[in-house]
Amino acid sequence: MPSPYTPSPTATQSPSAAPGPGVVPTVELPIDTDPPNGATFAQAFKVLGDFIAWLVDKFAIAGSMAQRIERWRNAKLQTRALISHAGFVEGKIMSWRECWETDSVPAKSAVGFGSWFGRWSYTIAGDAAGGLISGNFANVGPPTFGGGPTGTDPDMRTRNIFLATNPAGTAGSAQHVEATGQIILDADTCLTMQWDAKIHTISGNSDDAMGFITTSLQNAGGTTESNAPFGAWFEKVPGTGTWLCFWQGASGGVVSLNSGVTATGRQRFRIEVYGANSSDNSAHRVIFYINGTLITDQNVDFTAAAPGAGTAVAAPFFRHYATAELTWMNVQIADFNANTWPGDVAF
């Protein structure tokens, strides 16, 4: 009859070491001349069971103070995050989540620019009527000038911000926010950012852009494309109904690619940037996603802010531009991650 065995995460099945972080089990496999009895097969089953028992509920090994409990590595086997011996999730990573806490987001409506709140600066430029940059609560509708947001909108699933055009204006008006100077872009940098957004346009002539830039657009008017910044971004340009992927690196000028994805309703956006030393194929990369689908993967070098200008620094941004009608961009939770150290980001 079979004999039950309860695997133990602390057991040692010689000649294998006991389970632990980074330990590979040694499995004794029978050969043709071994006797067909239980002892011939027991070690292999027991050691695998013991290692599985440790994997399903990991813990630090007592006395191994410099040993992590677990780590995650990229395709180049560079450590990007770990759980330390102390049990903390660690790693030299710049990581933030912008939840647009409404109580901290001041409303801006007059033409001007400057610090906004936290890591963000703002710009309202163009028509003297100004525009609106403001925080908003979940399930609250879009803004109306003079009365604030009204009604409900289930697409506003979290706290969020609006960048809106004042319909009382007569000329183009830009509403822009950027998180200036977040991370240096060099050959070792890997950067990811993702966010949810929804836009509203009446005539189709609004311009909406989201991504990161390395040349500030603070106090700049006009569409994002017309400013030709260095960086990578999604943009719905006036007169079109789909999202375009834009980028400008150290060479080649501004390049665009039509995603074919209609700019309507609440959507998910993601941009990834890999320096040559952090990418799978050792080439600079920028990758665009919409709603979880990879749109394009391009070889683009962002390590210079502009040709001959030196090291680039990435600044996430959101920008809306339109003329004399109530159009808006809504931005919900945004996530940003980047390594702050070449190679392994922690021990």
Image (spheres, grey):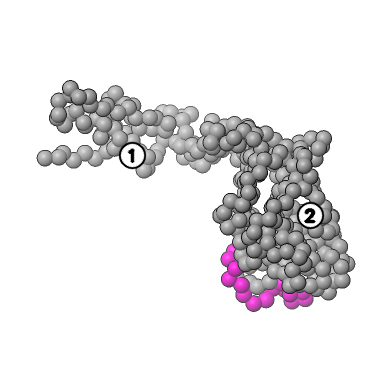
- Is residue 248 depicted above or below 276 in this figure? below
Residue 288 marker: none
Q: Quadrant of the C terminus?
A: top right
Judge whether residue 143 can be spotted in this image.
yes
Residue range highlighted in magenta:
143-164
Whether residue 156 appears in magenta in the rendering, the answer is yes
Residue 259 position, x and y percent, is: 65, 56
Number of callouts: 2
Residue at the spot x=53%, y=33% of the render? 77
- Image quadrant where residue 206 sits: bottom right
Element at label 1: helix
Question: In what quadrant of the picture does the N terminus appear?
Answer: top left
The residue labelled by disc 1 is 52
> How many C-alpha atoms fall within 10 Å of the one at disc 2: few (<14), some, or many (≥20)?
some
Residue positioned 46% across, 30% down in the render: 67
Q: Nearer the viewer, residue 102 or 56?
A: 56
Report x, y in % for residue 10. Answer: 32, 33
Find disc 2 in the rendering and name its residue: 225
Instruction: Report x, y in % for residue 123.
Output: 80, 58
The residue that appears at 63% across and 49% down in the rendered structure is: 296
Three-letter amino acid code at the position of disc 1: Ile
